[in-house]
Amino acid sequence: MTSIQEIHSIKKTPLYDRHLSLHGKMADFAGWLLPVYYTSILEEHRWVRRSCGVFDVSHLGEIRVSGAGAFRFLQYRLTNDLDKLEDGRILYSPLCDEMGFVLDEFLVYQAGKDDYYLVVNAANVERDCEALRRYAPDAVTLQDESGRTACVAVQGPLSEGLLERLFGFRLKDLGYYRFKEERYRGEPLWISRTGYTGEDGFEIFSPHSLAGPVWDRLMEAKGEEGVRPVGLGARNTLRLEAGNVLYGEDLDETVTPLEAGLGWAVSFSKEGGFVGRDMLILQKERGTSRRLVGFRVLEKPVAREHYAIHKEGRKIGKVTSGSYGPTVGANIGLGYVEKGFEAPGTPIEIEIHGRFVKAEVVKTPFVPLKHR
Amino acid sequence: MDTSKLRYTETHEWVSLNGNLARVGITDHAQREISDVVFVELPKPGALLKQKQSAMIVESVKAAFDIYAPVSGKIVKINEELGKRPELVNQSPCEEGWLFEMECSDLKEANGLLTEEQYQKFKTQPTH
């Protein structure tokens, strides 16, 4: 339930009025008023899988980390190995505390030598800045750019062609997890081949003033074989099918990246170590006591966040996200289970509305990824 | 459909009364709010319910929602078609998407329900 104080602090993106005129069903998401859907979550979900969906994700946070020593600082502060980066490339990395728990997860954009942009979860911006600042040397500057940066995600198989046609961008040669600067109406913006939906697609970062014109241009291509605005409801079902974790649900400061299946983004071998390494290496050697797994419900009801996962009458874990998967055509979800139950094919039971419903551990992603 | 004869609850169920038989569904406003319905867990015929008691669950892509008995009484019929086509709740909330029928045990309760006019006014009030 939203309290009166919260209402006053709810933020609007520069596209707020456009969502209203498109009859977006608005809701509070991490302190931002954003559309959950415009017409139907199911329709919008399916549209992204076969055509091109446009999302306002301006709530995402952006933190610029620059100055002499920025690379060394981030290399020590984050778990992944930034040596894999070069200018114009993007890397996913968790941010852990000293105990190895996940404080947030970032996309790290390398703009130049000692010049990085972190794209972070909306709800965590302030805490991220704090966690970074504690380790940042004096010569490194942290700037929270979230308040003036807008982001529009363009996702789905037709995205590349539509963006090239509408904006004259050249995107064919832009690889997955790469970005570049482009211009629209004489103003610079960044476009990256990234996304959360499991489809090929892009994210366009721009100053607030340019977000409206970019959105309007995209909406000119509305219709068959064209774009459609898509709300956060479908963004959630799309990301779940793609097996992408959501911070605050599948991931928080009580779990480690190894438990969450993000071990691939933790580099134990990089020089100089990183914050949280001691605890994580211990956990790696001993093995995690629980793991995040995908599951498929074998009956009709939907398994939702916090529902208990059971095995032979004993609770072995809990659901962290669950939904009907429109492309999968079944109820799916993610949840933590005790060690020993993580193998795909393991039969489990989920307590839904007071009864035990049959489910099965399955491999994620739930749908084939279409990233280029 | 002429909805002017329907009675309503503050929890967004509609009731169509025929003698002491009450057919129940969710309103058009409610189906828009909850968005696409993917599953309904219908009540068991024969179940006895008190007014405002949870009768069944409607699951949408957004969340699970309790549907409350608008009156006290016995469940006498359920809309089996929804097992195969839960989307009827969205497509036709007041007709094909009806949920269940109850034998109303106290008609006074039914008389206390909101009229169409009262409900239209109620639903446009800001929620808390």
Image (cartoon, coloured by chain):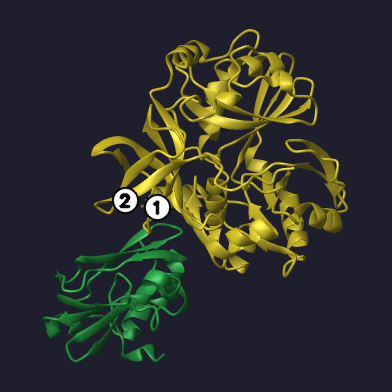
Chain assignment, label 1: A
Identify which residue is drawn at 61% across, 31% down. A106
- Check chain identity for marks 2 and 1: say if they share one: yes
Q: In this view, does B50 lie to the left or right of B32?
A: left
Q: In which quarter of the image is residue B85?
A: bottom left
* CB-based contact (under 8 Å), mark 2 and mark 1: yes
Q: In this view, does A296 lie to the left or right of A237?
A: left
Above or below: residue A150 compared with residue A220: above
Q: Chain B is drawn in which colour?
A: green
Mark 2 or 1, nearer chain start:
1
Identify the amino acid type marked 2.
Val
User: Which mark is on residue A357?
Assistant: 2
User: Which mark is on residue A298?
Assistant: 1
For the C terminus of chain A, which image quadrant?
A: top right
Above or below: residue A159 compared with residue A60: below
Q: Is residue B65 left or right of residue A279?
A: left
